[in-house]
Amino acid sequence: MAHVQQKSIEMVGLEGPGLVFIVYPEAIATMTGSVFWSIIFFLMLITLGLDSTFGGLEAMITALCDEYPKFLGRHREIFVAVLLFGIYICALPTTTYGGVYLVNMLNVYGPGLAILFVVFVEAAGVCWLYGTENFARDIEKMLGHKPGLFWTMCWKYISPIFLLVIFIFSLLGHEEMLGTEYKYPQWCFHVGYALTASSIMCIPLYIVYKFIITPGSILQRWKMIWKAEHSSENSALTYCGGTEV
């Protein structure tokens, strides 16, 4: 493709939206039965986007409706309609001529950096604060046997450390992740950092909230908020059907 377009390989678009909407369609066009494969390919893209959207939205909608059952749970249809309309309005700028650059910036600063940090905190919270042994004991209650040494080592060392290293290097190389086709102005980086912080700041804010509502002295509060809650060894597992094990 670089030879046909008389471009260098770096300019063909081997990553990001260019890979999906330029490289793959042109490659499919050279195949036998290109119309059939093009239909299958773009149907795959549509279903992939819809499934990803449904999964993310349903998690947020269900959590909010469960948290506020009287205000939102009783009017779920209206709440979902208002939420989707708001998302539609926010997404309209991505359909403009400069929308591809906005999508690229949102992809890097929106979920890219924040998800790595949030997942690292989840892994560290479960395996370092709650404890790998306690986590393995809970799994044993559900499955009847403890996880093997491989899983224990992954949870305790490999996964959190890898996630932290990936997050640090992604943070250091965030400008390179935006690509070289367009020179973003400096204010875009400030907006990007604000987007990333909007997700990351929820974690320290909740720590502050938990510290404030915990009774005791400052030292007692600090120790208490980092202490995991343990279930007793003889506690029963109650399932939705009411069966106890």
Image (spheres, rainbow, N blue to C red):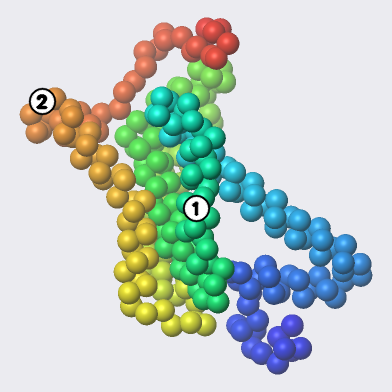
- Across and down, in percent, residue 156 comes to 41, 39
Element assignment for label 2: loop
Q: Quadrant of the N terminus?
A: bottom right
Please give left or right for residue 114 compared with residue 214 in the image: right
Sequence order check, earlier mark of 2 and 1: 1
Identify the mark at residue 87; answer none if there is no mark.
Answer: 1
Q: Residue at x 42, y 10 (%)?
A: 235
List the single residue furthest toward the bottom.
6
The amino acid sitting under disc 1 is: Ile
| Residue 179 visible in image | yes
- Across and down, in percent, residue 50 comes to 64, 49
When the figure is inspected, residue 148 is found, relative to residue 107, above or below; the finding is: above
Disc 2 to disc 1, how far (Cα)? 43 Å
The amino acid sitting under disc 2 is: Gly
> Is 147 or 221 nearer to us in this picture?
221
Question: Label 2: which residue?
Answer: 216
Q: Residue at x 70, y 57 (%)?
A: 45
- Across and down, in percent, residue 189 comes to 35, 71
List the single residue furthest toward the right.
32
Dot 2 crowding, Cα within 10 Å, few <14, some 14–19, many 20+ = few
